[in-house]
Amino acid sequence: MSYKKILIAVDSRENSLNIAREGFELADRLQAEPALIFVVDKAKAIGNPDVGIMPNEALMVLKKEAQETLDQLIRISGRTESTVKFMPEGLPKDDILHTAEIWGAEAIVLGINGKNGFSLWAMGSITQYIVLHSKVPVLIIPTRK
């Protein structure tokens, strides 16, 4: 089977650069089109009215962080601005799978949340959910120490 589209899921964690590089390298080897996805997790946009930060302002900060992360990963990886980027707002586990399906991804690349060992119980809940529910192959990039 040849893969034509590879969706690379990243976030603001340090390991995202490694995930992006591995995903881009895989896409290059397979002559596939890569795309980055950073899901703006609306559950984290809670704000703090006591200090004057409303939920909509917190969401704007998260969106800005996501855009800056995507731009930085593209730049550091030597990609062009025409690299496909997705930045949906919602729940990462759902939006990664939904975007993969809508875009027609034939593989998903993502990382684990810095856990030791390599088993389903050691993975983060998002990674575990995607592994169990994805309709396409999933490549998991471990955290390098």
Image (cartoon, rainbow, N blue to C red):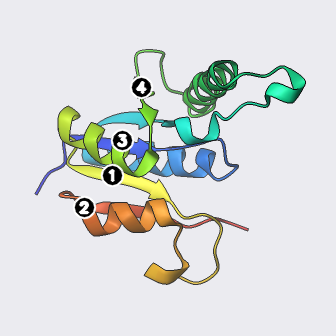
Badge 1 vs badge 2, beta-carbon distance below 8 Å:
yes
Label 1: which secondary element: strand
Side of 117 relative to 50 (left or right): left
Mark number for residue 95?
A: 3
Q: How far apart are marks 1 and 3 (CA)?
A: 12 Å
**Residue at (30% x, 43% y) in the render:** 6
User: Mark 3: few, some, or many residues within 10 Å (few <14, many ≥20)?
Assistant: many
Badge 2 vs badge 4, beta-carbon distance below 8 Å:
no
Side of 131 relative to 78 (left or right): left
Label 3: which secondary element: helix
- Percent across and percent down for residue 11 are 58, 43
Q: Earlier in the sequence, mark 2 or mark 3?
A: 3
Q: Distance between the residues labelled 2 and 3?
A: 17 Å
**Residue at (29% x, 48% y) in the render:** 97
Say which amino acid is labelled 1.
Answer: Ile
Residue 64, image quadrant: top right
Q: Earlier in the sequence, mark 2 or mark 4?
A: 4
Label 2: which secondary element: loop
User: Mark 4: few, some, or many residues within 10 Å (few <14, many ≥20)?
Assistant: some
**Residue at (41% x, 44% y) in the render:** 8
Residue at mark 1: 108
Q: How far apart are marks 1 and 2 (CA)?
A: 6 Å
Say which amino acid is labelled 2.
Answer: Pro
Mark 1 vs mark 3: in front: 3
Say which amino acid is labelled 4.
Answer: Lys
Residue at mark 4: 85
